[in-house]
Amino acid sequence: MLEQLAEQLKKVKDEAERLLAESKTIEAIRQAESRLMGKQGPLGSLLGQIGKLPAEVRGAAGKEINQAKARITELFAAAKTALEQAADKQASAEQTFDPTLPGPVVPRGSVHPVTAVQWEVEEIMARIGFVVVGGPELETDYYNFEALNIPAMHPARDMQDTFWLTNGWLLRTHTSPCQVRAMLRLGPPLSIIAPGRVFRYETEDASHANTFHQLEGLMIDRHISIANLIAVMKLILTEIFHRDIKVRLRPGYFPFVEPGFELDMQCGICGGSGCPTCKRSGWIEILPCGMVHPNVLRSGNIDPHEYTGFAFGLGLTRLAMMKYGVADIRGLNSGDLRAIIRPEQRSGAAIIDKD
Ligand SMILES: [Zn+2]
């Protein structure tokens, strides 16, 4: 009985060796193994018979069969390991390292187009003696309206759709509150700019957003006239666009200036032929400006008989759109990199930004 078994096990071992010699892949080894060990396979069927053997030989036969199984399992494991090691060796031989190749391009952050334009204007204005001041985004009715010659019930309040807080405060609708704050803090003469975020309760479209950036400018001294205003406006736009910009001045009504103007520049997206951004007019409203209203000077404790001044509110967001060719204002607040990465940074080359 046991002799017969020994013969069967030898056959199984020979079969295993034959199969291993034939198997060239790990998958083939796995298949051969399961063919041997499976219930129908030569070793599997022997394992299945142990329980049916006469009791006197069962122990010895079971031991023989299990030892044979362990040996065969080892053989297969060794063959698999050998194949795996060979594959690893080949893979590492194929992988060569070329130190002359450029490294992977690591995306790097950069300043937002609006910030870039803001810094640029700050630099230009600093050269002609303007200082940068700030102001709160949460404003009081007084600084946002009242002090700017826009009393309660004044129809001009309808010009600005305001986000009101439940306590009567508001999200500033323009950077103009910084005017009176600066007058009270610094006194005349003064030349300030105040960049910042402003908020309007507006329906969003290609040229309107509920959150955008302005830059307030204010210059007060004795004998300041419209000529000073025009000179400063021209300087800013020429410096920013590095080219001759077509502008036009239209009379405009703003309660805090008298006289007031609307300064438009030719649309940089369509070059003046008309597009959705300029509402097909070819012109983009860049800034309202004018001579500071005497009532506003009085709010700032400045005597309008002694001092005059001009003020302007530069649309930083619109300026950035013009300068960088962003057709839709919503892109600038979206986090969409196609809109907020400046063209000179799209090459993937490292850009050294300010700071
Ligand atoms: Zn246009």
Image (tube, rainbow, N blue to C red):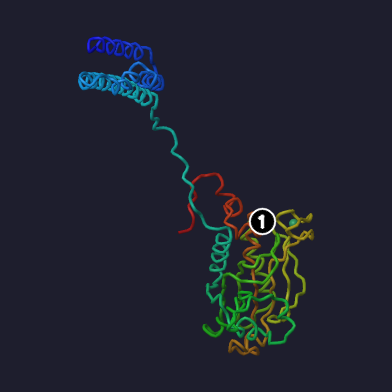
Residue 338, horizontal then vertical, whole percent: 60, 50
Indicate the quadrant containing the N terminus: top left, top right, bottom left or bottom right: top left
Query: Which image quarter: residue 70?
Result: top left
Residue on which disc 1 sits = 243
Q: Quadrant of ligand 1?
A: bottom right
Q: Residues within 10 Å of mark 1 (few under 14, many from 20)?
A: few
| Residue 41 vertical placement versus 341 (above, below) | above
| Residue 202 vertical placement versus 49 (above, below) | below
Residue 82, horizontal then vertical, whole percent: 31, 21
Nearer-the-camera pick, 183 or 135: 135
Nearer-the-camera pick, 207 or 294: 207
Q: Look at 22% across and 10% down and name the residue there.
A: 3
Q: Is residue 226 left or right of residue 139?
A: right
| Residue 60 vertical placement versus 146 (above, below) | above
Residue 190, horizontal then vertical, whole percent: 56, 79
Query: Which image quarter: residue 200?
Result: bottom right
Nearer-the-camera pick, 311 or 204: 204
Q: Secondary structure at mark 1?
A: loop
**Does the residue tagged 1 have its C-beta within 8 Å of any atom of ligand 1?**
no
Q: Look at 75% across and 60% down and name the residue there.
A: 278
Query: Which image quarter: residue 217?
Result: bottom right
Residue 314, horizontal then vertical, whole percent: 64, 69
What's the residue type where badge 1 is placed?
A: Arg
Q: Is residue 151 left or right of residue 340?
A: right
Indicate the quadrant containing the C terminus: top left, top right, bottom left or bottom right: bottom left
What number of labels is visible? 1
